[in-house]
Image (spheres, helix red, strand yellow):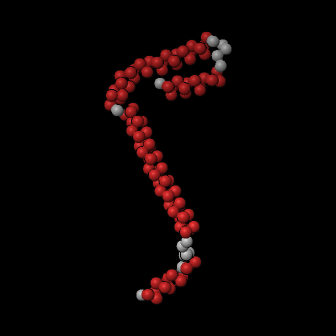
Amino acid sequence: MKNDVIDILLAYSEYFSKSNFIIYGFRLLGWVFIKFLGFLVDKLEDVVRSVIVVTDFFNSPEITNLINKFRPLLYLLLVASIIFIGYQLVINKKFDRSKLPMNIILALCII
């Protein structure tokens, strides 16, 4: 049993080093730095969790009911904006048609 331990220690002796105060100090500083990084990651995780809770605002029943209540008004606003774009295309000859697709996408995203 004792010889097995000595054989293992001799086989892996290149990975071992004698300890001194300088190496111990660097090892201690490294460990404190790793603990600080762990603390920082834990705090960032808490921040992410609080952001997730805040973004759950739109899934609350009160806000969902409010959005559902105003949904017909939003569709009416979408139809009015499409009619206005069509009117501008027919009447206004200086209407910049190159910006039309971007304006339509923007209107759909807003509504």
Residue found 49% across the figure and 85% down from its top: 6
Residue found 50% across the figure and 25% down from its top: 110
Judge whether 49 appears above or below 2 on screen. Answer: above
Residue 87's spot in the image, x, y percent? Answer: 57, 13
Q: Quadrant of the N terminus?
A: bottom left
- Residue that sits furthest to the right in the current view: 94
Can residue 71 be seen by looking at this rendering?
yes
Q: Quadrant of residue 60?
A: top left
Q: Quadrant of residue 73?
A: top left
Residue 16's spot in the image, x, y percent? Answer: 54, 75
Specify whether 73 is left or right of 106.
left
Can residue 15 be seen by looking at this rendering?
no
Residue found 45% across the figure and 52% down from its top: 39
- Residue that sits furthest to the front in the current view: 21
**Observer-nearest residue: 11 or 111?**
11
Judge whether 4 appears above or below 23 on screen. Answer: below
Q: Quadrant of residue 72?
A: top left
Q: State the count of labels.
A: 0
Residue found 44% across the figure and 18% down from its top: 76
Specify whether 9 is left or right of 98.
left
**Observer-nearest residue: 50 or 75?**
50
Residue 14's spot in the image, x, y percent? Answer: 58, 77
**Observer-nearest residue: 82 or 102?**
102
Judge whether 101 appears above or below 15 on screen. Answer: above
